[in-house]
Image: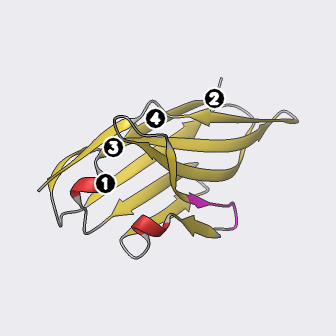
Amino acid sequence: QVQLVESGGGLVQAGGSLRLSCAASGNGLSINAMGWYRQAPGQQRELVASITRDSSTNYADSVKGRFTISRDNAKNTVYLQMNSLKPEDTAVYYCNVLYNRYGFKDERWGQGTQVTVSS
């Protein structure tokens, strides 16, 4: 069983910062890409940022220069540092992990963490 545990969401004023974490656990786990998605009310889920195993990154245009994704392979953990937050960043943020386990490829989603940015 592969589990993801997210943390770090909350309420912050515009211009503030938050750091999200997502830790993956499970026997025989080898993680490939990791990413953060978000979904605002009435909107589709969208990619915020992703990072490969060798730390190549990709960002949505709306967060470039403000958000930074990183990972700790030894801890199977991905982070999202969010600076200069805007009210339009308000959403539920979901961690996504692509992995190999015992010769099979699969993916897992986190439970989601609420980020609310007040104006």
Q: Residues within 10 Å of mark 1 (few under 14, many from 20)?
A: many
Q: Which residue is mark 4?
A: 5
**Which mark identifies residue 119?**
none
Q: Main secondary structure of the magenta part?
A: loop
Of residue 49 and residue 4, the one placed in the foreground of this image is 49
Mark 4 vs mark 1: in front: 1
Instruction: Identify the element where label 1 is drawn.
Output: helix
What distance separates the C-alpha of mark 4 from that of mark 1?
21 Å
Residue type at mark 4?
Val
Whole-percent x and y of residue 16?
18, 63
Callout count: 4
Q: Which percent across, then down, holds residue 115?
A: 28, 45
Q: How is the image coloured?
A: secondary structure
Is residue 4 part of the magenta span, yes or no?
no
- How many angstroms separate mark 2 from mark 4 (CA)? 10 Å
Q: CA distance from mark 4 to mark 3?
A: 18 Å
- Pick the residue in front: 9 or 71: 9
Query: Dividing the picture into quarters, in which one does residue 52 lie?
Result: bottom right
25 vs 62, left or right, is right
> Which residue is depicted at the point 18% across and 67% down?
15
Q: Are marks 2 and 4 in contact (CB under 8 Å)?
A: no
Of tags 1 and 2, the one toward the viewer is 1
Q: Is residue 60 above or below residue 32?
A: below
Q: Which residues lie in the magenta part?
A: 50-54
Q: Residues within 10 Å of mark 2 (few under 14, many from 20)?
A: some
Q: Which residue is identified by label 3?
A: 91
